[in-house]
Structure formats: C-alpha cells, structure tokens
C-alpha cells in the first residue's frame, strides 16, 4: 500500500468500525425490551468509564514500544516483562475492586448480579486486549490493529444473534461482548505478545528516573482518558438512576449524537502524528488547528441537517416506532457532542505538546459537570443542557488559550518550549 495512503486508511476503517458498533446497538434494541435496553446502555456506559484503565495501558505501551526497535520481539525489549505483568496485575486488581463495589453498583443501576459480573469480566479482558493493541500501535502495525478491532465487533455481533436465538436477553449482549473481546485477545496475543514468558526478565535493572517517567506518563494518560470516557458515559448513568423509564429513549438519542464524536475522534487520530511531530512549530500547529476548525465548520452543517431532518425520521426504521420519543433529545445531543469534539481536539493537542496544565482544566470541567448534574435534574434533557454549557465554556477557553499560545507569546519573546508547562 502507498505510504501516503496508510495514515488515511486507519481513520477510514475506524469510521466503518463505528458503523458496525452502531448496528450492534440497533440489533440490541430489536431484541431487548425497553427496560432491558436501558439497563444494557447503562452497563455499557459504565464499561466505557471503566475502560480508562485499558486505554491508558494501550497508550503507555504504544509510547514505550515506539522508542524501541520495532523488529525486536517483546521479550527482547528492556521493558518486555513489565509490559506483560502490569496488565495482568491491573486486570486482577480491577476485578477485585469492582467485586468489592458490587452492592453499591447494583443499587445505583438497578441491575442484577449476573450481568454486573459479566461486565467485570469484560473490563478485565479489555485491559489485556489493550496491552496487545498498544504493542501493535507502538510498532505502527495499523492494519493488524484494525483487524483486531474488527474481530471484536464482528465476533460480538455473531455471538449476540446466536445467543438471542437461544432466548437470552440482557445476558446475550454482555456475553457476546465478552466473547468478542476474548477473540480479539487471542488474535492480539498471537500477533503481538507471542513467545513472551510470564516470568521472563531482561536482567536489566530499571533506573529510578524511568519509573518516575512511566508513572507520570501513565497518570497523564489516565486523567485524559478518564475525562473523555467520563464525558461520554456519565449522563447515561444519571438518567438510568433518576429516570429509568426514559433511559431507553435517551440511550437511542445518545447513539445518534455520539456519531459526531466517533467521526471526529477518527479525524483526530489522523491529526495525532502531525500534532506530535509539529508540537513546537508554532506556524505548523496553527495550520493544523485551522484545518480542524474548517472541518468542524462543515461538521456543524452536517449536525444541523442530521439532527433536524435525518435522524428523527430514521428512528422507527432502525429502532422501531416505540422509541420515537427519543427524537426530543437528538438536536441538543448533537450540538453537545459537536462542542465536545472541539474540546477533544485541544485535549489531545495539549497532551502531545506536553502542556500538563491542561489537566487542571479537565478536572475542573468534570467537577463542574458533576455539580450541575446534582443541582439540576428535573428531566433527562437537563443533563444535556448542563453538558452544552460546560463544553461550550471549555471550547471557548481552549480556543482563547490556543490564540495566546500561538500568537501572544511571540510578542513576549518567549519560546514555545518555555511555554510548555
């Protein structure tokens, strides 16, 4: 494949992958009753929030392996043993913590123990799969990484239809998700971690400075991913807790709204290499921001047309007429995720440039959102309004901050490198 086309193929395949995931939710709405579908989406929202551990492991693994010789097997790398043992330890630790919190989670979500324990297994599998995906990403084996994602989504689709044919409902969705993740793990193990012994040791003692660097990288990645996953899942958990009778309709609206997020995230994936390479080049960084701004302007038109005309009329065709009430949430949800896509771009830019002070902005935004949710929750749309205000304020802050970062510092005579604190 032409080297110039390879960076474009991953976001393209990623958008198509999200299409399969969207169909998975459509299929779930066909077979699950209204209450069960609301519970399923609350569980998947909780999984999205808990997947922060796996995604952080993936990013850290990719970063460490990218600095090594890509031709060397994992067991020959200086950190090879650590990169296997850490995910195993985090898997056990995550499941143990969730088991301890089980009574609280069951009370908050109103879901039985069986589906919750399946969810805990899914979280553990995700941590292991993410380790393998980080290996592939670090070696820039993007086609293999795409294949791994497709094995998961196609596997869970096939298993879901097979299990629903056997009469299972909510359990079918979670078992299928676990099955797809397990197939993905097997593929990832074969193509990435093959031949690594659990007790292998390179014999080289790691310097204390490296441990500090690893801890800092993992913490930054954890906070960033936690903010992103928190934002795309927390409102669904609140709706399930306060308005369980409307949770299924709200979940349908979220599936449409989050299409904006999925497309923008795929676009950001294409920007990431250039943002990392040009992080200290003010002119190049400004051009990248301008290009993304142009794309978001086009996206605004698409959001208006989609949420006003296309999405509401497609609900009875895709999900059934019983979910038509979801249309009242779609327009607001579309603009919420349009604003969130702007925030998302700047979050990644700050991480790649190395501006750690952006972490404070993320924590402040998350705290403000939680406060708003607790203060105003008379109806489900109140959560969307709170998100609209918070993401709007964060977008304005990041745009103003980018202007200062790119232009004002020239007047002060400061270097970009000195500003990266």
Image: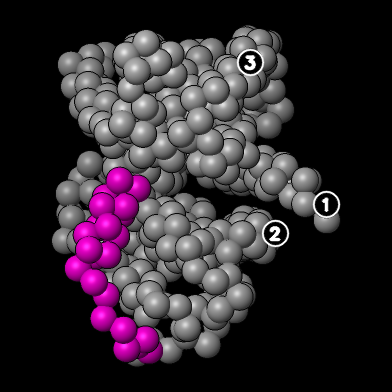
Q: Position of residue 57 (x, y in %)?
A: 38, 59
> Which quadrant of the figure contains the C terminus?
top left
**Labelled disc at residue 294:** 3
The residue sitting at the front extreme is 413
Q: Which residue is mark 2?
A: 143
Residue behind mark 1: 2
Residue at image position (50%, 30%) is 281
Q: Which residue is at a point 53% across and 13% down the rendered structure image?
A: 331
- Classify mark 2: helix, strand or loop: helix
Which secondary structure lies at badge 3? Answer: helix
- Circle nearer the N terminus (2, 1): 1
Q: Is residue 199 left or right of residue 305?
A: left
Q: How dense is the environment of label 2, judged by Cα within 10 Å: few (below 14), some, or many (20 and up)?
A: some
Residue numbers of the magenta segment: 200-222
Tell me, for residue 117, which label it has, or none. none
Left or right of 276, for residue 237: left
Which of the two marks, 2 or 1, is nearer to us in this view? Answer: 1
Q: Position of residue 106 (x, y in %)?
A: 24, 50
Q: Can you see residue 209? A: yes
Please name whichever residue, 299 or 321, is drawn nearer the observer in this view of the structure.
299
Labels 3 & 1 near each other (Cβ < 8 A)? no
When the figure is inspected, residue 269 is found, relative to residue 291, above or below; the finding is below
């Amino acid at each position: 494949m032409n080297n110039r086309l390879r960076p474009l193929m991953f976001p393209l395949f990623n958008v198509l992958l999200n299409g399969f995931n969207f169909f998975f939710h459509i299929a779930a709405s066909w077979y699950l009753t209204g209450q069960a579908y609301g519970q399923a989406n609350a569980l998947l929202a909780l999984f999205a929030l808990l997947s922060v551990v796996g995604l952080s492991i993936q990013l850290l693994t990719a970063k460490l392996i990218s600095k090594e010789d890509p031709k060397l097997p994992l067991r020959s790398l200086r950190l090879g043993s650590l990169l296997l043992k850490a995910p195993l330890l985090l898997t056990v630790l995550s499941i143990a913590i969730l088991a301890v919190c089980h009574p609280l989670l069951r009370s908050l979500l109103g879901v039985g123990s069986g589906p919750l324990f399946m969810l805990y297994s899914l979280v553990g599998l995700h941590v292991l799969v993410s380790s393998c995906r980080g290996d592939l990403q670090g070696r820039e084996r993007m086609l293999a990484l795409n294949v791994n994602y497709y094995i998961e989504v196609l596997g869970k689709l096939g298993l879901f239809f097979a299990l629903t044919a056997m009469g299972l409902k909510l359990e079918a969705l979670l078992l299928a998700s676990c099955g797809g993740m397990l197939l993905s793990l097997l593929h990832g193990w074969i193509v990435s971690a093959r031949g690594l012994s659990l007790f292998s040791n390179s014999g080289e003692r790691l310097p204390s400075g490296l441990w500090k660097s690893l801890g800092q990288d993992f913490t930054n990645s954890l906070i960033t991913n936690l903010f992103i996953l928190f934002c795309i899942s927390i409102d669904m958990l609140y709706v399930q807790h306060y308005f369980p009778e409307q949770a299924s309709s709200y979940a349908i609206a979220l599936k449409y709204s989050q299409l904006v997020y999925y497309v923008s995230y795929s676009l950001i994936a294409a920007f990431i290499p250039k943002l990392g390479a040009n992080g200290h080049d003010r002119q190049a960084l400004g051009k990248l921001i301008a290009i993304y701004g142009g794309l978001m302007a086009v996206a605004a038109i698409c959001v208006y047309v989609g949420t006003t005309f296309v999405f509401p009329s497609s609900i009875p065709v895709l999900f059934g007429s019983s979910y038509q009430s979801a249309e009242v949430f779609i327009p607001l949800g579309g603009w919420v995720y349009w604003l969130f896509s702007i925030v998302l771009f700047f979050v990644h830019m700050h991480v790649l440039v190395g501006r750690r002070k952006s972490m404070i902005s993320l924590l402040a935004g998350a705290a403000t959102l939680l406060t708003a949710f607790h203060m105003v929750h008379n109806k489900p749309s109140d959560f969307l309004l709170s998100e609209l205000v918070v993401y709007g304020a964060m977008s304005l802050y990041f745009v103003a901050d980018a202007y200062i970062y790119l232009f004002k510092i020239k007047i002060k005579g400061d270097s970009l490198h000195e500003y990266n604190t």
